[in-house]
Image: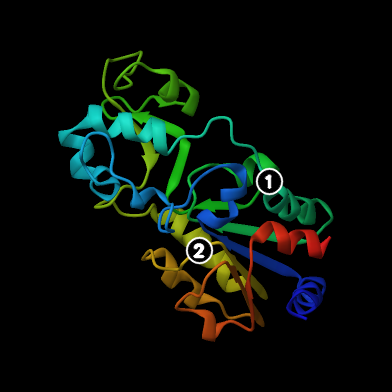
């Protein structure tokens, strides 16, 4: 019944905003953060907890340890878009107005073909020298020995990924809020809605229908018009 309601809402909607978290990328082989088997449940071989390592201050003090963890646990260069990423990209190709606001840093929405993507927490595919600002792609960082250094000036290269203690990019936030505010259907997928300020963005939705698809309950379930507790791939397979 919920799938049918979702299908009807999608057919009716002129502007769809998809708000995604780690759950949409798990089927692509990228682990989430907060589940029982997620990234935060582990202790790194360095002895530090993952949540400690992804602080800006840790990056500054222990850049080598940060990169050991980052390259082994947060970069997945072989990952490909799954059926869910491709489904929303295909909707856009069919003429639907689709925007994506994502908390993920994997770049899979863009790789699938979505053109309006707001990456709230940055991307592993963008990296910059802290000294001269030179750009480096994810492959350069992943294949570098130890801490990646700038080819031009020798400075340390940092991922364009938002670490704890860092603020979100103002332009990305403005674009994301505009996309949410102007949509008449908001589909929230694979997120616990526990990370702020990103989770608060759903409050800017002024449209008709909120759909929440997640394996477990979230703090926003009561505000949603349609709630589906399932893996997103199962949902997509029913939709198509």
Quadrant housing residue 190? bottom right
Residue bearing mark 1: 82
Q: Residue at x 29, y 46 (%)?
A: 50
Are the residues at dot 1 and dot 2 in contact (C-beta closer than 8 Å)? no
Quadrant where the C terminus lies?
Answer: bottom right
Work out how far the residue at label 1 is from the one at label 2, CA to CA, in angstroms: 17 Å
Question: How is the rendered protein coloured?
Answer: rainbow
Q: Is residue 183 visible?
A: no
The residue closer to the viewer here, 169 or 186, is 186
x and y, in percent, of residue 193 in the image: 45, 68
The residue closer to the viewer here, 92 or 30, is 30
Quadrant housing residue 228? bottom right
Q: Earlier in the sequence, mark 1 or mark 2?
A: 1
* Residue at the limit of the structure toward the front, as seen here: 36
SS state under label 1: loop
- Please state if 218 lies on the left or on the right of 188 as rendered: left
Dot 1 surroundings within 10 Å: few (below 14), some, or many (20 or more)? some
The residue closer to the viewer here, 188 or 123, is 188
Residue bearing mark 2: 191
Quadrant where the N terminus lies?
Answer: bottom right
- Please state if 162 lies on the left or on the right of 19 as rendered: left
x and y, in percent, of residue 117 in the image: 59, 51
- Please state if 165 lies on the left or on the right of 121 as rendered: left
Q: Residue at x 40, y 32 (%)?
A: 72
Q: Is residue 109 visible?
A: yes
x and y, in percent, of residue 196 in the image: 36, 65
x and y, in percent, of residue 216 in the image: 52, 70
Is 213 located above or below residue 83 in the figure? below
């Amino acid at each position: 019944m919920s799938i049918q309601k979702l299908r009807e809402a999608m057919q009716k909607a002129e502007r769809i905003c998809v708000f995604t978290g780690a759950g949409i990328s798990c089927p692509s082989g990228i682990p989430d953060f907060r589940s029982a088997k997620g990234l935060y449940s582990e202790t790194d071989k360095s002895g530090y907890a993952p949540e400690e390592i992804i602080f800006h201050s840790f990056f500054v003090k222990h850049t080598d340890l940060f990169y050991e963890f980052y390259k082994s646990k947060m970069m997945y260069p072989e990952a490909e878009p799954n059926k869910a990423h491709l489904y929303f990209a295909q909707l856009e190709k069919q003429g639907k107005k689709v925007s994506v606001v994502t908390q993920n840093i994997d770049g899979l929405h863009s790789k699938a073909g979505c053109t309006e993507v707001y990456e709230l927490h940055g991307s592993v595919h963008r990296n910059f020298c802290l000294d001269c600002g030179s750009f480096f792609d994810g492959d350069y960082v992943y294949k570098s020995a130890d801490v990646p250094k700038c080819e031009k000036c020798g400075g340390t290269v940092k991922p364009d990924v938002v670490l704890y203690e860092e603020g979100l990019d103002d332009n990305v936030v403005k674009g994301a809020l505009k996309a949410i505010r102007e949509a008449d259907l908001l589909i929230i997928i694979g997120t616990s809605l526990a990370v702020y300020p990103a989770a608060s963005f759903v409050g800017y939705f002024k449209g008709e229908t909120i759909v929440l698809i997640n394996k477990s309950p979230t703090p926003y379930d009561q505000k949603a018009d349609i709630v589906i507790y399932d893996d997103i791939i199962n949902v997509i397979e029913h939709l198509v």
